[in-house]
Image (cartoon, rainbow, N blue to C red):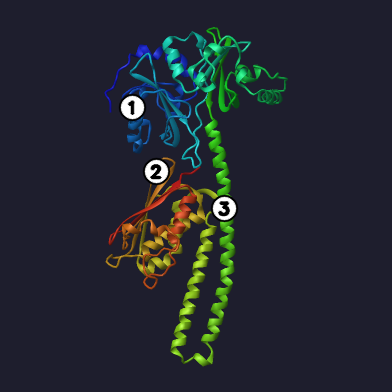
């Protein structure tokens, strides 16, 4: 880590009071060692730490410890080549908020040119298909005490370092008074082309403005014309910032999708002097959402098709197996072969094979139905394991097995599937017991991790060779010969599918002759 570079508080704090309070995204000023010098109110609220306490920390402390090296690499890479990043650029990592929930973010960093040893850092929450956590960013802007046009040079440099388009307009005509570098990069216009000459309407699609006017007119029961009033009506009348999605038309005629937040700019006497619009380019996000949605629909259709095939095929396979079994029994009982030991042995093979095949088909049907038999709810796992002990009482008595579990949490899931998950793991711990152990012992316990509970199911069985760790979770994969231990090799496949249906993952650690521990995660209660 680089040596910390100090920045005088009076050089930073005064301008930030005016700028950071206006922006509804987490922003930081850091030195090039990663030490936080200033954080805006949105950042303080998101991470649940006051500005004073944040200034005592390094930026990487906001991330789970497993990403420490990635954050260091992110900062060191920037220090080596401090170029200005464009929209869509940046690093994607995972943060955790004040409630210890994890969420994807994109980091953007830009050097503050008036102070070569400090940088402006932006955290932009990013949407994903299996998002770990949904974050609602803290609300409204703190109103400005003066128009952004009169910001100091240092303030303006921070403003221009932002990746967002920041445009201010005057009241009531809506003429542009501030057009930052982010707006220039996003829209292709220069500040000289638009400031004092036109309104933001030049970048808007008129049909969207007309449609928004109709929506507002219906919402407020009055006629609102499709002009500048459409953009700042809610900010002015309700005193809160108004966020909507719009299509922007760039200078070269290309169109982009943006999320625009508008708030009022007030003078010292409380009167409205103008409006501030902060926009971020969401074109890539929209395209990604579209692709993800289309892919999800395709996957869902394929899954339904596969499930129908599995169900139909399994039922169709049962009938010829029953026929083989029935005629085999008839032939086996025929007078002509009652004393034929070879023939009787062959019929015994046929009977055993058809019985095993019927068992495999039933397992396949059960596997295809996982996740569709029960509603999702909050489940007290202590009750689930207690009921499981009662149902498996005969097995425990015959094998002299012991099941130990600590105080287990309440999770969100399917009670039927979760019961099957624990039943399979406990049964395996008993089935694959170690002859050298006094008796089979299975221990279940859990610990909290962000957004999930992590469970450990430990046994003192024969253990599993490391080379088989991935194989054991595949359908019909058995590591022991069928004559030694009964089963179809599908129990752990069931476990894997149940865990994944609950948004978690499962793995195993094991030592031959000592035992195995199955580790998996399940979502916390909703």
Residue at image x 55%, y 7%?
269
Q: Secondary structure at mark 2?
A: strand
Q: Secondary structure at mark 3?
A: helix
Badge 1 density bin: few <14, some 14–19, many ≥20, Cα 10 Å: some
In this figure, which residue is indicated by the disc labeled 2?
A: 448
- Say if 115 sits above or below 93 in the image: above
On the question of residue 394 being in view, the answer is yes
**On the picture, is 303 further left or further right than 522?**
right
Mark 3 and mark 1: Cα distance apart in space: 47 Å
Give the foreground label among 3 and 2: 3
Badge 3 density bin: few <14, some 14–19, many ≥20, Cα 10 Å: few
Q: Quadrant of residue 449?
A: top left
Residue at image x 45%, y 22%?
41
Give the foreground label among 3 and 1: 3
Q: Earlier in the sequence, mark 3 or mark 1?
A: 1
Give the foreground label among 2 and 1: 1
**On the picture, is 198 further left or further right than 52?**
right
Mark 2 and mark 1: Cα distance apart in space: 25 Å
Q: Which mark is drawn over residue 58?
A: 1
Q: Which mark is drawn over residue 357?
A: none
- Say if 328 sits above or below 177 in the image: below
In this figure, which residue is indicated by the disc labeled 3?
A: 302
On the question of residue 145 being in view, the answer is no
Measuring from the top left, give residue 430's x and y in whole percent: 37, 64
């Amino acid at each position: 880590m680089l040596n910390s570079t100090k920045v005088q508080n009076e050089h930073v704090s005064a301008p930030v009071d005016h700028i950071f309070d206006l922006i509804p995204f987490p922003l930081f000023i850091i030195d090039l060692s990663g030490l936080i010098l200033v954080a805006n109110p949105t950042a303080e609220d998101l991470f649940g730490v006051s500005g004073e306490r944040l200034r005592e920390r390094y930026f990487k402390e906001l991330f789970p410890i497993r990403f420490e090296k990635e954050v260091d690499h992110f900062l060191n890479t920037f220090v080596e080549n401090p170029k200005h990043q464009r929209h869509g650029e940046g690093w994607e990592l995972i943060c955790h908020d004040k409630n210890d929930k994890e969420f994807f973010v994109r980091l953007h960093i830009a050097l503050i040119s008036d102070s070569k040893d400090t940088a402006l850092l932006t955290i932009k929450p990013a949407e994903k298909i299996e998002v770990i956590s949904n974050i609602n960013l803290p609300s409204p802007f703190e109103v400005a005490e003066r128009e952004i046009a009169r910001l100091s040079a240092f303030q303006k440099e921070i403003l221009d370092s932002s990746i967002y388009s920041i445009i201010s307009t005057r009241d009531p005509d809506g003429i542009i008074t501030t057009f930052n570098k982010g707006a220039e990069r996003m829209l292709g216009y220069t500040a000289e082309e638009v400031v004092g000459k036109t309104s933001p309407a030049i970048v808007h699609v008129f049909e969207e403005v007309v449609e928004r006017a109709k929506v507002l007119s219906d919402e407020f029961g009055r006629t609102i014309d499709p002009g500048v009033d459409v953009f700042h009506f809610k900010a002015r009348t309700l005193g809160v910032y108004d966020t909507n999605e719009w299509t922007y038309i760039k200078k070269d005629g290309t169109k982009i999708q943006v999320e625009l937040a508008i708030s009022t700019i007030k003078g010292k006497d409380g009167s409205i002097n103008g409006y501030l619009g902060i926009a971020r380019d969401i074109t890539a996000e929209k395209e990604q959402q579209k692709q993800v949605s289309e892919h999800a629909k395709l996957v869902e259709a394929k899954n339904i098709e596969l499930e129908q095939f599995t169900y139909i095929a399994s039922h169709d396979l049962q009938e010829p197996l029953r026929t083989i079994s029935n005629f085999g029994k008839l032939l086996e009982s025929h007078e002509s072969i009652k004393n034929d030991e070879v023939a009787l042995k062959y019929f015994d093979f046929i009977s055993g094979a058809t019985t095993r095949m019927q068992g495999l088909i039933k397992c396949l049907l059960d596997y295809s139905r996982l996740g569709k038999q029960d509603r999702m709810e909050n489940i007290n796992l202590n009750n689930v394991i207690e009921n499981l002990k009662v149902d498996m009482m005969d097995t425990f008595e015959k094998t002299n097995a012991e099941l130990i579990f600590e105080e287990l949490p309440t999770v969100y899931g399917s009670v039927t599937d979760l019961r099957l998950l624990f039943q399979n793991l406990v049964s395996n711990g008993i089935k694959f017991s170690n002859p050298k152990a006094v008796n089979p012992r299975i221990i279940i316990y859990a610990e909290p991790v962000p957004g999930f509970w992590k469970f450990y199911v430990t046994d003192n069985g024969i253990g599993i060779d490391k080379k088989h760790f991935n194989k054991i979770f595949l359908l019909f994969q058995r590591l022991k010969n069928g004559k030694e231990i009964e089963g179809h090799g599908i129990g752990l496949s069931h476990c894997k599918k149940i865990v994944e249906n609950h948004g978690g993952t499962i793995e195993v650690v094991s030592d031959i002759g000592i035992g195995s521990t199955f580790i998996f995660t399940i979502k916390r209660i909703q």
